[in-house]
């Protein structure tokens, strides 16, 4: 973004902003921890959009933004086995019958513009030997959602993770998403719902199973 000359001048009281830009630009960010590095980066953004990071309303904004990103991107610090926490069980279940967990809300950040996309995930699997604790499927969804993502990849990552830990007869994942990068900027279209699917095992080849799943999730 151009500074149209405002940041460099001293007559309008913004000389301190130019000094702050030069001071921050000279810092070595690799020496900072991740939170401090994000805080300094946010200060640079504020300066370069024409703001004063030292004014009252913005003084703690860098800290708030850094904590926000820690929360929204906590999936980078999680792994599948820790999320599962050994919650796999041997349970008798009808042959060929599916387990469905529908309407799992998620929030993620688009990796292209770092703007939110939100929606619901619907997951089903056909057990072979084991089932997984109910709470673990939403936790797996969150683990992949809480990263910089594209919806297509996230959908496949959820399906692949379940296939890896359960060795099921089949897995299907449907993800619906509303993307603010398409509603706030660019095409500026509101209410657009993107749907992605990932099918593994029997769900790839058995149309009756897919139809039953779609019926169970109300689609």
Image: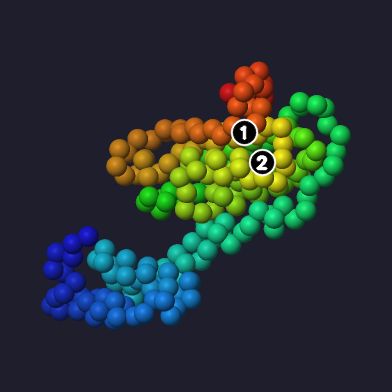
Q: Is residue 53 above or below residue 182?
A: below
Q: Quadrant of the N terminus?
A: bottom left
Q: Nearer the viewer, residue 162 or 21?
A: 162
Q: Nearer the viewer, residue 200 or 119?
A: 200
Return the x and y of residue 16 as percentages of the image width and height.
Answer: 24, 80
First of labels 1, 2 by sequence position: 2
- Mark 2 crowd level (few <14, some 14–19, many ≥20, 10 Å Cα): some
Q: Quadrant of residue 166?
A: top right
Q: Identify the residue position indicated by label 2 in the image.
A: 163
* Picture coordinates of residue 10, whole percent (x, y): 15, 79
* Res 215 seen here: no
**Between 138 and 167, which is closer to the camera in this rendering?**
167
Q: Position of residue 69 (x, y in %)?
A: 49, 61
Tell me the distance, in whole angstroms, between the alpha carbons under discs 1 and 2: 8 Å
Q: Is there a contact, CB below 8 Å, between mark 1 and mark 2?
A: yes
Residue bearing the label numbered 1: 200
In the picture shown, does residue 64 fall above or below 126?
below
Q: Secondary structure at mark 1?
A: strand
């Amino acid at each position: 973004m151009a500074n149209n000359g405002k940041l460099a001048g001293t007559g309008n009281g913004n000389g301190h902003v130019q000094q702050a830009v030069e001071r921050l630009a000279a810092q070595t960010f690799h020496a900072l921890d991740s939170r401090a590095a994000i805080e300094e980066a946010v200060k640079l953004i504020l300066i370069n959009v024409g703001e004063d990071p030292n004014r009252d309303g913005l003084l703690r904004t860098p800290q708030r933004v850094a904590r926000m990103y820690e929360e929204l991107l906590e999936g980078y610090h999680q792994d599948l086995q820790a999320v599962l926490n050994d919650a796999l069980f041997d349970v008798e279940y009808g042959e060929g019958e599916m387990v469905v967990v529908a309407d799992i809300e998620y929030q993620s950040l688009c990796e292209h513009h770092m703007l939110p996309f939100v929606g619901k995930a619907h997951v089903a699997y056909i057990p072979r030997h084991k089932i997984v604790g109910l709470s673990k499927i939403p936790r797996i969804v969150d683990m992949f959602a809480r990263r910089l993502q594209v919806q297509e990849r996230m959908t496949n990552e959820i399906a692949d993770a379940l296939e890896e830990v359960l060795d099921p007869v089949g897995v299907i994942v449907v993800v619906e998403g509303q993307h603010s990068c398409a509603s706030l900027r660019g095409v500026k279209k509101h209410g657009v719902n993107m749907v992605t699917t990932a099918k593994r095992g029997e769900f790839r080849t058995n149309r009756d199973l897919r139809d039953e799943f779609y019926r169970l999730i109300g689609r």
